[in-house]
Amino acid sequence: MHSIRCICVSGTSGAPINLVSNLFKLERAPNFHLFQYRVDYNPEVPSRGMRKSMLKEHQDLIGSIYQFDGMALFLPIRLEREVLCDGWNIFTADVYNLLI
């Protein structure tokens, strides 16, 4: 358990308020890296859920540890080159290209 340190700051005008904050320290592994990639779909896929589902089909290329918000892909590994994948949309059966 860490000790609590109080920082007191006073202004010159306004009404005083009590303020409490919940802080915690984030530990980071010494050799950890996080790489951000943009993911484009051709043709465009309007649904974020569909984009996530379609990207998941390519875990053999990106690995099983990733975070994807529908456009930005975060990986703990560096991809050696630009990745172009072909696939099909399981919801519409359309063929698509995915570029990372």
Image: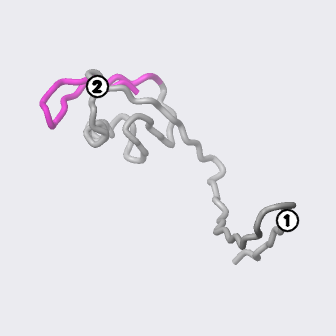
Query: Split into 4 quadrants, where in the image is the C terminus?
Result: top left
Q: Which sits in the foreground, 97 or 62?
A: 97
Q: Is residue 35 left or right of residue 16?
A: left
Towards the viewer: 29 or 6:
6
The quarter holding residue 22 reads bottom right
Query: Which residue is pictured at 67% across the width and 68% down the height?
Result: 21
Residue topped by disc 2: 44
Work out whether 50 lies above or below 1: above
Q: Quadrant of residue 39?
A: top left
Task: Assign the N terminus to one quadrant of the image.
Answer: bottom right
Q: Amino acid at mark 1?
A: Ser
Compared to 49, does 20 lie above or below? Answer: below
Going 77% across and 70% down the picture, which residue do you hit? 16
Q: Is residue 93 magenta?
A: yes
Coloring basis for residues? one colour
Residue 61 position, x and y percent, is 36, 34
Query: Which labelled disc corresponds to residue 63?
Result: none
Residue at the spot x=66%, y=51% of the render? 30
Place of residue 96 in the rendered image (x, y in percent of width and height, measured from the top left): 23, 24
- Judge depth for marks 1 and 2 and give the one in front: 1
Where residue 77 appears, x then y in whole percent? 50, 39
Q: Residue at x 27, y 32 (%)?
A: 46
Residue 61 within the magenta-colored segment of the rendering: no
Could you say which quadrant of the image residue 42 lies in? top left
Q: In the displayed structure, would residue 45 be above or below residue 65?
A: above
> Element under label 1?
loop
Range of magenta residues: 81-100
Residue type at tag 2: Glu
Label annotation for residue 10: 1
